[in-house]
Amino acid sequence: MFIAAAKWAESPGKELWFSVDSVTYALACAVYGITPGPEWCQEETLTSPRIIEMTKKISHKEHPDGLKQSAAWTGHPGKIFSQPPTAIEVVSRNGTFTADSNDIPGDSWNSKMKLTDDEIIAKFRTNASYVLADTQINRIIEVVERLEETESISELTNLLATQALST
């Protein structure tokens, strides 16, 4: 991890570039229930005093089994990022909470964690809602859902290109 990302709260402009790799920033956004996606990149989130203060309360380190797993890995290079050992400990006024997991929602290497069609559509809606109108999002979803039945993807590319040209 980059030193700058680890010390994101100390960066003078709260740069988006550093927030992308900042575990503390991602966890602070999660603490405040900010849906992962474009809202994390909004100026008001990047400069939010409560997010900045929360990042200063969060610490993290490598999971000891993660380094062992990486050193021993002999399979497909992409799969090493699948099912990494992860643990969390949250200490609050109400006590301590701990959890361990090896699963990442949406992990394409882990069949039990693949997103459903509804989850993929919801994720697309969230991300696209910052740049596309609901009617256009709905049309794109409709076209993609029947993509296997079409002879040309021009309808889809036109929907995407029209928005790109108008912005």
Image: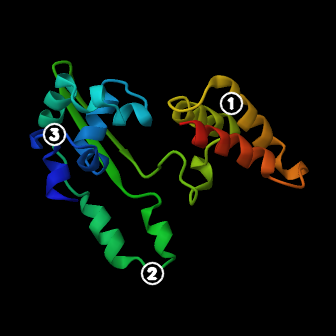
Circle 2: residue type: Thr
**On the rendered structure, is 159 left or right of 41?**
right
Mark 3 and mark 2 lie on one chain; the one further toward the N terminus is: 3
> Which residue lies at the image location 23% right of the left edge and 58% below the top edge?
62
Local crowd at mark 1 within 10 Å, few (<14), some, or many (≥20)?
some
Task: Identify whether 131 is placed above or below 86.
Answer: above
**On the rendered structure, is 125 left or right of 102?**
right
x then y, percent, for residue 139: 75, 32
On residue 136, the disc is 1
What is the secondary structure assignment of the residue under circle 2? loop
Circle 3: residue type: Gly
Q: Quadrant location of residue 81?
A: bottom left
Q: Give the farthest residue toward the front.
A: 166
Q: Give the farthest residue toward the bottom.
A: 74
> Which residue lies at the image location 58% right of the left edge and 42% below the top edge?
164
Task: Identify whether 63 is placed above or below 88.
Answer: below
Of badges 3 and 2, the one in the foreground is: 3
Local crowd at mark 3 within 10 Å, few (<14), some, or many (≥20)?
few
Circle 1: residue type: Gln
- Confirm or deny contact between disc 3 and disc 2 (CB under 8 A): no
Residue 36: tell me if it is visible. no
Between marks 3 and 2, how big is the CA–CA gap?
A: 41 Å
What is the secondary structure assignment of the residue under circle 3? loop
Q: Which residue is mark 2?
A: 74
